[in-house]
Amino acid sequence: MSTQIRTSNQNFYYRHLQCWIDIKESLKLWKLAYSMAWLDIKLRYKGSFLGPIWMTFSSATMMLAIGLIYGSLFKIHTETYLPYLSFSLIFWQNGIANMIVDACQCFLQTDTFIHSLKLPFFLQAIRTVIRNFLITFLNCITPFLVFIYYHKWPGTIILLSIPGFIIWIINSLAINILLGSICARFRDIPQIINSLIQIVYYITPIMWMPSQIHNFQSLLLLNPIYSTMQIIKGPILGEIPTISVYLSALAYSLVLWGLAWIMFIRSRTRLAFWI
């Protein structure tokens, strides 16, 4: 009995150690991950004259249409609503929704690399995050122009969004490990995730503002997407997030990384077989 317990503990620590080594080796190869991410963007828009700039035009057109319609419905002045909507919509589409969708395919779409090259698995998560970060950065041109037009630049308070961006990147890595591993084993999960994203979109203040629900704003802290977006979006819009928002964002991050780490430990040695 004691021998079995000792063997089990050894296997447990060994798997933890292998996961740490995987992450460490992946971080050393961040330049490779960047090159692969940029290549993904090039291949996605191969043959296109403007390339990813088309996304900026598409986002700008949709933002303008939604801003004018919903601004009049909500009876909010355009100079207040459009800057809010522009960043909320762009960050949701590229920084949250697309990140989650790509996380589901993190390992499935890179099966050729995994089967043919001996690379750490966490490298694929870094690759996905860098790719979505670059696309999000390119699409931020639209909110930047809107802020200039309405003279809404927040000033030095925008620096408070840096910790939020760091948390977002760290959480994105965790989401890729968690959903990438689950979806590699269960192929029906991506369809379920796509349906859930539509629901989260409507219950998160993206098209509507938190001030519109008056006394129920505290309930927004139950939405982890709201906390993550608010610690980034708030300073950019000239607002300082409350302590409760920061604490809830950190709490959700710890839970997310805990789940991701458990899944990575259990699935790392099986991923190559699942895909």
Image (tube, rainbow, N blue to C red):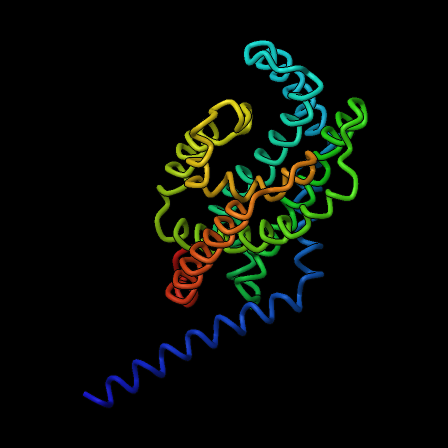
Residue closer to the observer: 114 or 7: 7
Instruction: Tell me: residue 128, above or below residue 23.
Output: above
Name the spot of residue 184 as percent of width and height, x first: 41, 52
Instruction: Tell me: residue 171, above or below residue 261.
Output: above
Q: Quadrant of the N terminus?
A: bottom left
**Residue under the image location 60 percent in, 44 percent down:** 231
**Residue under the image location 39 percent in, 36 percent down:** 191
Name the spot of residue 120 as percent of width and height, x first: 55, 66
Name the spot of residue 14 as percent of width and height, x first: 42, 79
Q: Is residue 107 visible?
A: no
Horizontal side of 104 relative to 120 (left or right) equals left
Kindly give the residue lying farthest to the bottom in the view shown: 3
Kindly give the residue lying farthest to the left in the view shown: 1
Residue closer to the observer: 87 or 197: 87
**Residue under the image location 46 percent in, 51 percent down:** 252
Q: Quadrant of the C terminus?
A: bottom left
Kindly give the residue lying farthest to the front in the view shown: 215
Q: Quadrant of residue 49?
A: top right
Horizontal side of 237 relative to 113 (left or right) equals right
Q: Is residue 3 visible?
A: yes
Q: Quadrant of residue 78?
A: top right
Name the spot of residue 128 as percent of width and height, x first: 59, 50
**Residue under the image location 64 percent in, 27 percent down:** 84
Count the marks: 0
Instruction: Tell me: residue 68, above or below residue 37.
Output: above
